[in-house]
Amino acid sequence: MRAWRVVLIALAGVAAGCSASGFSWTSNRSINGNNTGGIVPEAVTNENEQMELARAHCAQYTKQMRVTARPSETGGKLIFVCEAPGTPPPPGAAPSGQGELPPGVRMKKK
């Protein structure tokens, strides 16, 4: 009977150690966020997949996604905001793919 107690206590200690260290049998691929934006965890290693998860998250709220920090800048996490469609980017934001600059941002002369 005493041997079973020792075994149970040992297993409980191992389980507590695993949960305290952040170990999980399944990787956490869910987005931590709400209707204003969120963070895609580093468990999603492909940046394209992170972008798609962020777009799908914002689409739940009929909003568009804008990246505020890339995984290379944040240790693997993608940080984004959800904005209403047609919202212009804030001053100083990276230019969009069409080559146009945000309002109030001027190109530096060479």
Image: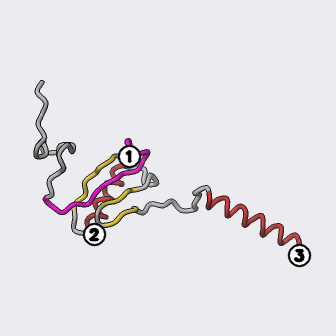
Secondary structure at badge 1 equals helix
Q: Which residue is mark 3?
A: 1
Residue 60 badge = 2
Indicate the quadrant containing the C terminus: top left, top right, bottom left or bottom right. top left
Secondary structure at badge 2 equals loop
The residue under label 1 is which amino acid type? Answer: Pro
- Left or right, 38 with respect to 11, comes to left
Q: Which residues are magenta?
A: 72-86
Residue 103, magenta (yes or no): no
Residue at 10%, 46% (x, y): give it: 103
Marks 2/1: CA distance?
23 Å
The residue under label 2 is which amino acid type? Answer: Gln
Q: Position of residue 49 (x, y in %)?
A: 35, 54
Residue at 32%, 59% (x, y): give it: 54
Give the mark nearer the N terminus: 2 vs 1: 2
- Left or right, 78 with respect to 99, comes to right
Residue 71 badge = 1
CB atoms at circles 3 and 1 under 8 Å apart?
no
Residue at 18%, 63% (x, y): give it: 84
Query: Dot 1 surroundings within 10 Å: few (below 14), some, or many (20 or more)?
Result: some
- Left or right, 17 with respect to 28, comes to right
Question: How many numbered discs, if any?
Answer: 3
Marks 2/3: CA distance?
55 Å
Instruction: Spot the residue most to the bottom.
Output: 1
Give the mark nearer the N terminus: 3 vs 1: 3
Q: Position of residue 7 (x, y in %)?
A: 81, 67
Query: Dot 3 surroundings within 10 Å: few (below 14), some, or many (20 or more)?
Result: few
Give the mark nearer the N terminus: 2 vs 3: 3
Q: Is residue 65 above or below residue 34?
A: above
Marks 3/1: CA distance?
52 Å
